[in-house]
Image (spheres, helix red, strand yellow):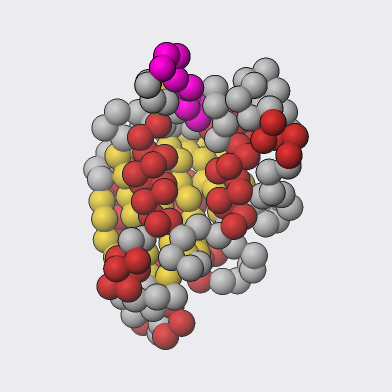
Amino acid sequence: MRALVIYCHPREGSFTAAVRDKVLERLHNDGAEVRLHDLYAEGFNPVMSAHEHEIYLDETQNQIGHEAYIADLQWCDTLIFVYPTWWYGLPAMLKGWLDRVLVPGIAFLMPQAENETIRPGMTNITRLGVFTTCGASWWLTRFVGAPGRRTILRGLRLICAKRCKTAFAAHYLMDSSSDASRAVHLAKVHKQMDRFLRGKTVNEETTA
């Protein structure tokens, strides 16, 4: 197994970092090859420039500056995102990473004829995981529509391998969480990773 973990949180020592460490621990214990990108630590710039937008469809140029990320995307068969949910969605840093790195010719293939749609480009990815934290409650997040979860586990999954297995775990009500609720959630992350690495789709969520 070749696992790429994309981590996005500005503070080391956060509970999200503890979730990241649990995911990495489980991957290493399973003998997986692991590559980690910490977007804040790497100083990733999430802002797409006018020039990047201009060359977005030019597959001879749109990868320039992102070669390392793209190489890792093409290398992995398992892609895992660990991040906090802010305003029900992805942090701007992570959304910008999707905008700038998942370009045509890599993440997806552009239509070849009128009225066609895009085609998957990341068919090497057979497992896709999301491990997140949410300040809002489960019911409020779902009422709003959980746009962050949908972006990755619906939108991004569509351009991965057919029957790509998924995992999702979220600790809701983080602002009123307790030591006990956080410990329970880390145990569930461990359990969920076990099932995920065995090729099963899993979905467990923890409320405070």
Q: Does 116 sit above or below residue 202?
A: above
Whole-percent x and y of residue 73? Answer: 54, 32
Q: Does 75 sit above or below residue 9?
A: above
* The image quarter in which residue 52 lies: top right
* Magenta stretch: dominant secondary structure: loop
| Residue located 60% across and 45% down the image | 97
Query: Is 108 contained in the magenta span?
Result: yes
Q: Nearer the viewer, residue 116 or 25?
A: 116
Q: Residue furthest front?
A: 114
Q: Which residues make up the magenta segment? A: 106-114
Quarter holding the N terminus is top left
48 relative position to 136: left or right = right
Counting the numbered discs, the total is 0
Whole-percent x and y of residue 131? Answer: 42, 57
Query: Is 87 contained in the magenta span?
Result: no
| Residue located 42% across and 40% down the image | 156
| Residue located 36% across and 51% down the image | 150
Q: Nearer the viewer, residue 152 or 164?
A: 152
The answer to whether residue 21 shows anywhere in this view is no
Q: Nearer the viewer, residue 188 or 55?
A: 55
Q: Residue furthest top?
A: 113
138 relative position to 81: left or right = left
Whole-percent x and y of residue 166? Answer: 32, 44
Quarter holding the C terminus is bottom left
Q: Nearer the viewer, residue 80 or 64?
A: 64
| Residue located 63% across and 39% down the image | 100
Whole-percent x and y of residue 197? Answer: 33, 43
The answer to whether residue 148 shows anywhere in this view is yes
